[in-house]
Amino acid sequence: MDRELGELLAGQISTPAYVFDLDGLKNRIGRIRSALSGRAEICYAIKANPFLTGPLIGEADSFELCSPGEVRICERAGAKREQMVISGVYKEEADLEHFFADGGPAPIFTVESERQLALLSGLSDRYGCGVDVLLRLTSGNQFGMDKETVRGILRRREQYPRLCFMGLQQYAGTQKKTAKRIVRGVEKFAAFAAALEQEEGYRAECLEFGPGAPVNYFDTDHYPEEGEVLPALAACLDRLTFEGRVVLEMGRFLAADCGTYLTRVVDVKENDGRRYCVVDGGIHQLNYYGQALGMRIPEILRLSGEDGGAAEQWDICGALCTVNDVLVREYRTGELRPGEVLAFRRAGAYGISEGSALFLSRDLPAVYFYEKERGLWLVRGRTATDPLNSPAELTKI
């Protein structure tokens, strides 16, 4: 969103609100596909922004889902079962059974533990159907399994005749600092797959990898930009000897740039020589990676206001009753005035879903989509949270 478009939209929107530019989103995916030239498929992790699931059907090849709620979102959006990758460290039989019971096509499941392996094996045996699974390799945390556990499962894979061990999955982290680190992660993952073929006689059909491609949120960020990341990834994929499908799982890198968070100035004041600007939003609705209590400066556009006068330092604070609700400290700009709108750029990933949305029972912001041909339209109105923070009725247990 540039300033001209932002000022046009600010007059139509009640703040706080999110606006997602679908043209920008689809253009970004187009650039990624063009750079990779068919070397890899694109998987969208909807936890980054579930609202974009529908617009990405037909754009992304698959969707990573990490909870029953995300599955329902994907189903309502019209995604096919074959496009779903059911991931996550917590899988319950009751949540998975409907995939087997209705006799329809099954999604792909990640296996993140021996317990999940037994769960999927039991369901496949009970319903007499095959299941495609990806063995998730840990990157040194609670997700996935270590190399020896993966090897052990593959050594006894004949014990699970209904499970198709179609490949491996790994998420290598987020916000990788250099393109070289991104490439090194892909190469190490592919090398492990090659070792499994040589040592265990197992040939993977698919490698799904989260490369951790970064986004520059703050004025002090110096992560590699799209123009460096994509050529490096393309060259890396060209060098791989792996002959199966490669899937790149991304969320932040796809979605961040398409989103803008709009919040209105409701008060300005000075305490002990320090200027404060209070807005109608806050940290419960905008959560940049590594925000560190507002100590770094994101890109902000001032809309419906004059950016005149000498630049002063401002602390931009939200509407929550906590001293932690600071969006930006020491933001340098001219006089801020109640009524003007501030637009925070690159808010398309996680900000909408990762904040403490229920704190103080503030309403959830409205959500809008924008396309040049269609214009602006509302996809979720402002939503009260107080019903979620109070009992509907008293029920004796």
Image (cartoon, rainbow, N blue to C red):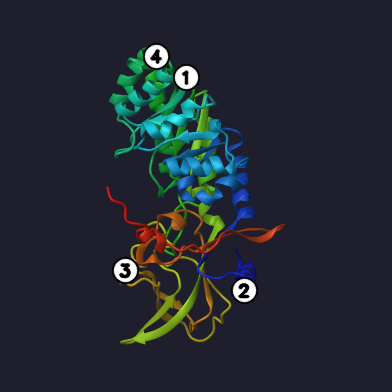
Residue 48, percent from left and from top? 47, 49
Point out the tag, 3 or 1, that comes first from the N-terminus: 1
Disc 4 residue type?
Answer: Gly
Frontmost residue, 29 versus 118:
118
Disc assigned to residue 237? none
Marks 2 and 3, how far apart in space? 30 Å
Q: Secondary structure at mark 4?
A: loop
Point out the tag, 4 or 2, that comes first from the N-terminus: 2
Q: Secondary structure at mark 3?
A: loop
Marks 1 and 2, how far apart in space? 54 Å
Point out the tag, 4 or 1, that comes first from the N-terminus: 1
Disc assigned to residue 130? 1
Q: Secondary structure at mark 1?
A: loop
Marks 4 and 2, how far apart in space? 63 Å
Disc assigned to residue 11? 2
Q: Nearer the viewer, mark 3 or mark 1?
A: 1
Marks 3 and 4, how far apart in space? 54 Å
Q: Nearer the viewer, mark 4 or mark 2?
A: 2
Q: Residue at x 64, y 54 (%)?
A: 23
Residue on which the image places disc 4: 201
